Amino acid sequence: MNKYGYVVEIKVERRFIGPNGCPNSIGSGVVWDQGSYKVEILGGGHNEQVNREGGVHVEYDNVRRKYAMTQGSLNKKKGIADIVFLLDVSGSMTPCLDALKANIGVLIDGFTNPGSNADAIVKDWRIKVSGYSDYNADGSQWWQEYPFTDDPDQVRENLASLEIKGGGDEPESLLDGLWMLAKMPATDKGTQPLSDSWRYKSDAARVVIIFTDASCHMELAIPEAGGAGFEDVVRKVQSVGMRLSVYCPEADCYHSISSIDKAEVEFIGSLSDAVDKMAEFTSNTENFEKTLDQLAKSISASAVTPEL
């Protein structure tokens, strides 16, 4: 495999010459004998190039993959992840933010060196830090964000730079934050990553890690969302392939979020004791490190994306 594509094995079940008169043909005027060929798919889309074993290059258009290869032979990209910390920055979350800053190295070490029994290692990661409060109470100051970075020290600095907000009433604007992330631009396939954009959907897994000790509004308030609701957010999140890991109090809104495809939700207390339980959860260094280690393993497993 090289940087342009991936290697697959094409099994030809019968001899044919393409494409004249042959609906399942590969290549123009090239004889494909029965047998197996190791080929390299270069680039994407139409007019891809096949390098048949022996060095013969064949131009073809729209390979009919259902005849050429099985679904199981499709290559998957492994070990690449764009990770966003989406954090409630209301005042009661200060202990959680301090614990994340102190232990972020545990998380990074966990998914870059998960151990000999792990199925996947995140070899190429970037972390973005975002903070949210309540748009209804804080207006334009409800949202904070820092660009993607692969520097652990910069991640710590970004976490430390989050400004604690009042938040007003107890529900916060988590869904608005998910909307902001889902609407974030993405780079084109195979191009250089940009710090203010997701990588192309099949170039990297997209993981969003949420910590909050409050419930969330189920209707969006930010003007750019145009009055969108929960189901609109679900569609956005799933369409861009965001995988959610949520640490939150048990509440109806988070039971709803747990229904989103690939979402993982861990309840920490209930709404009546969420502030104390989150503080207790994050101040216990040993348990918090175990949580981050488990989260790292989940990220490693998530960081496998199918080639598109």
Image (cartoon, rainbow, N blue to C red):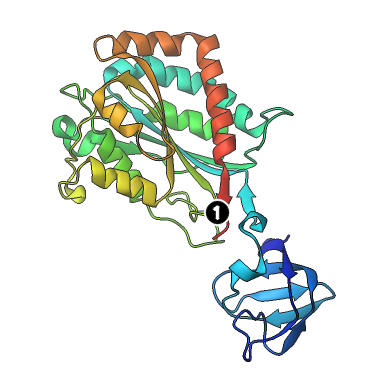
Residue at left offset 80%, top offset 71%: 35
Against 66, is 175 above or below? above
Crowd around label 1: few <14 · some 14–19 · many ≥20 (10 Å): many
Q: Secondary structure at mark 1?
A: loop
Q: Residue at x 75, y 74 (%)?
A: 51
Q: Position of residue 70 (x, y in %)?
A: 64, 60
Is 61 situated left or right of 18 in this image?
Answer: left
Quarter of the image with the N terminus in it:
bottom right
Residue 79 in picture, x, y percent from top left = 62, 43
* Residue 188 in the image: above or below residue 91: below
Above or below, comparing residue 145 to residue 279 in the picture: below
Please name the residue that numbered disc 1 is placed on: 203
> Is residue 295 at all visible to an observer of this figure?
yes
- Quadrant assignment, res 64: bottom right
Quarter holding the C terminus is bottom right
**Residue found at x 55% / y 58%:** 192
Q: Residue furthest right?
A: 54
Residue 184 appears left or right of 127: left
Which residue does the image show at 32% across and 18% down from the upper left? 249
Badge 1 amino acid: Asp
x, y percentage for residue 247? Answer: 39, 23
Residue 151: tell me if it is visible: no
* Residue 238 shown left or right of residue 16 in the figure: left
Marks counted in the figure total 1
Task: Please state if 220 lies on the left or on the right of 34 as rendered.
Answer: left
Q: Looking at the rendering, which quadrant does residue 30 occupy?
A: bottom right
**Frontmost residue, 177 versus 32:** 32
Horizontal and vertical percent for residue 269?
34, 12
